[in-house]
Image: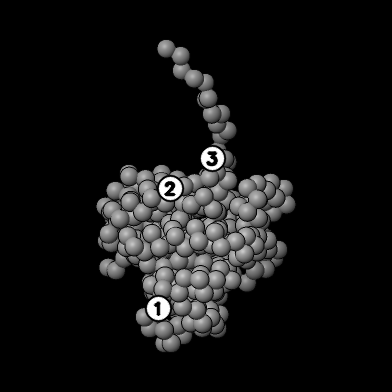
Amino acid sequence: MNPFLDVPFLPEDGYVEFLNNCSGEIDCVQFSLHSGRRLDSRIQLETLDLHERCIELLGRLPGPRKYGLLNSRFYGPALFTDRQSLKSVINILDRCAERGVINGIIYCDHYLLQLLSNEAPDLAGALEAVPGINTLLDSYAKVEAQLGYIGETRFRQPGKIILDRSLNRDLDRLADTARRCRRSFPDLKLELLANEGCLARCPFKLSHDAYIALGNHHGQDCTYLLNRGLGCMRLVDEQPHRILQSPFIRPEDVDLYLCHIDTIKLCGRTLGSEFLQRAISAYLDRRYDGNLLDLLDTLQWLAPSLYVDNPSLSFDFANMLSMCDNQCDSCGFCKDLFASISRPLPVRIRDNRIAVN
């Protein structure tokens, strides 16, 4: 079988060893550039300067293709007006390219893509430009347009493209979009994100991405408090059955989706290598006999207090949800199903006492 997983990379020896042990199933990895600047789409309040260590460990992973993350929703004006700021980004990408540990970048801000193309055309010509998941490519028309705009830069066309989360729960649209993409772009791999766990068609998504970018720019995170008090965490806390409406792909349903696409992306790099190894192992095994929330990135905050029995979901769960008409008030299917497969977990108080000899 062809490699089918796209997974996060972490600069840890044990995790690199784990990835090498399952390298036959890993198609590609995504990695943070680990510079002093905050360049990707996750909050990083601490100053990281690990790119040399990251480059070294990427070099120990010879098989998968490697993509650097420049996928923040937007960047502060200084990156576009201060040549020194831009030069630091170009230098890191150059260093990765010289060492042969980068095939392309994952981006969301097309201004940045054009700027890099203008200022470092030779570097751009050596790298693929891969639109990130938050470019929301939910139709053939959007894919075609995005590829056309990449063609206006010096960057290489992407070897893969990730389709929007919404298609995970609309198998007819997924099949149609995939069919048209393969007819027009036969060498382009198609990908879906499996384990994010966010709300279906989340109304907070675009603002959330913007607040993450602002948090990285200003060095102060407000996204947790916003989500807890006003956003998606509030809704899930009040109506936990909405978890089943999330467009996740279970490990048991991987093969259904591989009929249409080539690779499955897993997220969760800020949760550490233990989480990632658990998730990767589950998707490789095509099963997980535990709490579904243990595998979902954005719902990890709920996993210690709520158990959702993954094996209790039926073999045709994905097919059933793909026929959903979103008439939740008159349906009640998700509420009833959720009540039958979930239970609260007992409160556990962490013991922070220091052992005294």
* Dot 2 crowding, Cα within 10 Å, few <14, some 14–19, many 20+: some
Q: Position of residue 110 (x, y in %)?
A: 57, 72
Tag 1: amino acid: Leu
Look at 41% across and 73% down and name the residue there: 122
Marked residue nearer the N-terminal end (3 or 2): 2
CB under 8 Å between callouts 3 and 1? no
Q: Position of residue 6 (x, y in %)?
A: 40, 62
In the visual, does 351 lie left or right of 262?
Answer: right
Tag 3: amino acid: Pro
Q: Position of residue 11 (x, y in %)?
A: 38, 48
In the visual, does 184 lie left or right of 61?
Answer: right
* Dot 1 crowding, Cα within 10 Å, few <14, some 14–19, many 20+: some
Circle 3 is placed at which residue position? 304
Circle 1 is placed at which residue position? 188
Circle 2 is placed at which residue position? 50
In the visual, does 212 lie left or right of 113?
Answer: right
Look at 41% across and 46% down and name the residue there: 273
Q: Nearer the viewer, mark 1 or mark 2?
A: 2
Look at 41% across and 87% down and name the residue there: 183
- The residue at the far right in this view is 230
Secondary structure under tag 3 reads: loop
The residue closer to the viewer here, 116 or 319, is: 116
Secondary structure under tag 1 reads: loop
User: Is residue 208 positioned above or below 187 on the image?
Assistant: above
